[in-house]
């Protein structure tokens, strides 16, 4: 059975989520969407703002989708999929104050949803005019940007070009992985947003092999006790980890890379232990590794404490076999991450 793509549409209050949703629903793309709208108050109005279409519309009110009504989300999705309606995709519009992390996790922990759907993207709408204030006073706004697979920078007509560039630089520090689409009144070419498999790391790498950024050596000697490795032993590395420190609610990104192959068992043990111990602080992580004795690339990603990884396609002859790893989160210890990764290198 072909799995159905799901877009999680998020963004802070007033950013333009419903405007973008209406553009998608009325767009000339030949797709039909089931829409789930979550509102925080007891009386919902978002459904009244959505354009009249033949789409199936579900509304969940009196609670935030990422906490009190998460069970309602699961039940709504089950009911929607079990009825066998005629739709090509699902769009979930969260409240403006929702943390998208738990919403995404829902699709990883529910076996029925795993079998029938896949997360196509977390699309975050950002209000260019007010994002500076939001990053200063709202942890949720920061979370929404950090989790995004793509960002729609909306209301750009209200901001000067030099300020826009500053905003984009700030967004990239929070999330170096997500492409940024500038927009006015949420108008973005839909083929740039829909069914892009933005959450599918393997698909991204097939389109943009360098999307994890330039190579940055991941040196370091701090012993990671989750890996069976002598902390005095050092493999050959060049350079240091790339660390974009951001003072927005403590969220930052760390990029690591290595030019040597890894021990698959040690790497798996380290990543699992790292996510188990620090998963609440690690919002997102994505990586691609060369494993000793394996001709295929090991690709992995995590959302908080949920981790998935698999061997994907063969390394191409023209590819540089350097491993790359990016973390986005809070309280990231660069040296510990460097040394933990280094400890997993193949003998």
Image: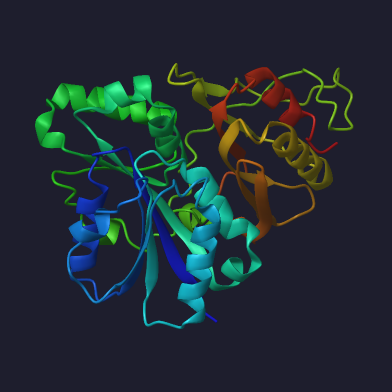
Residue at the extreme front of the image, as rendered: 42
Q: Name the side, left or right, on which 53 lies relative to 150.
A: left
Q: Is residue 7 left or right of residue 180?
A: right
What number of labels is visible?
Answer: 0
Q: Position of residue 322 (x, y in %)?
A: 62, 40
Residue 9 drawn at (x, y percent): 36, 51
The residue at the point 44 percent across, 46 percent down is 64
Q: Is residue 323 left or right of residue 51?
A: right
Viewer-nearest residue: 18 or 1: 18
Name the quarter where the C terminus is drawn: top right
Quarter of the picture holding the N terminus: bottom right
Side of 203 relative to 31 (left or right) = right
Seen from the viewer's position, the closer of residues 98 and 178 is 98
Q: Is residue 318 visible?
A: no
Q: Residue at x 25, y 40 (%)?
A: 15
Q: Quadrant of residue 267?
A: top right
**Residue in the foreground of this view, choosing between 173 and 97:** 97
Asked which quadrant contains residue 148, the reply is: top left
Q: Residue at x 80, y 29 (%)?
A: 343
Between 198 and 119, the residue placed more toward the observer is: 119
Where is residue 74 drawn, in percent x and y? 54, 62
Image coordinates for residue 85, horizontal then vertical, percent: 40, 82
- The colour scheme of the drawn protein is rainbow
Let me know if residue 26 appears in the view.
yes
């Amino acid at each position: 059975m072909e799995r159905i793509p799901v877009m999680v549409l998020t963004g802070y209050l007033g950013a333009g989520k419903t405007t973008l949703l209406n553009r998608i629903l009325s767009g000339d793309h030949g797709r039909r969407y089931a829409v789930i709208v979550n509102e925080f108050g007891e009386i919902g109005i978002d459904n009244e703002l959505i354009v009249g279409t033949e789409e199936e519309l579900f509304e969940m009110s009196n609670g935030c989708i990422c906490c009190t009504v998460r069970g309602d989300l699961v039940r709504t999705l089950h009911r929607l999929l079990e009825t066998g309606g005629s739709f090509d995709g699902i769009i979930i519009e969260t409240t403006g104050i929702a943390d998208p992390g738990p919403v995404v996790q829902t699709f990883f922990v529910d076996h029925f949803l795993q079998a029938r759907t896949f997360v196509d993207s977390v699309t975050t709408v950002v209000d260019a005019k007010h994002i500076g204030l939001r990053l200063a006073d709202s942890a949720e706004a920061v979370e929404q940007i950090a989790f995004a697979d793509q960002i729609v920078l909306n209301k750009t007509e209200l901001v000067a070009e030099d300020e826009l560039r500053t905003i984009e630089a700030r967004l990239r520090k929070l999330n170096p992985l997500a492409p940024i689409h500038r927009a006015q009144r949420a108008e973005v070419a839909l083929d740039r947003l829909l069914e892009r498999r933005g959450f599918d790391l393997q698909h991204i790498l097939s389109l943009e092999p360098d999307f994890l950024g330039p190579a940055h050596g991941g040196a370091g000697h701090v012993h990671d006790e989750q890996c069976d490795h002598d902390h005095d032993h050092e493999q050959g590395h060049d350079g240091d980890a790339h660390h974009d420190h951001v003072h927005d609610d403590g969220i930052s990104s760390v990029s690591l890379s290595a030019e040597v192959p890894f021990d698959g068992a040690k790497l798996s043990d380290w990543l699992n232990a790292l996510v188990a111990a620090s998963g609440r602080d690690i919002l997102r992580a994505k990586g691609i590794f060369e494993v000793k004795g394996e001709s295929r690339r090991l690709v992995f990603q995590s959302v908080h404490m949920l981790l998935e990884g698999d061997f994907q396609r063969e390394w191409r002859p023209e590819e540089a076999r350097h491993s790359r790893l990016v973390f986005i989160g809070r309280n990231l210890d660069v040296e510990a991450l460097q040394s933990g990764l280094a400890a997993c290198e193949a003998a």
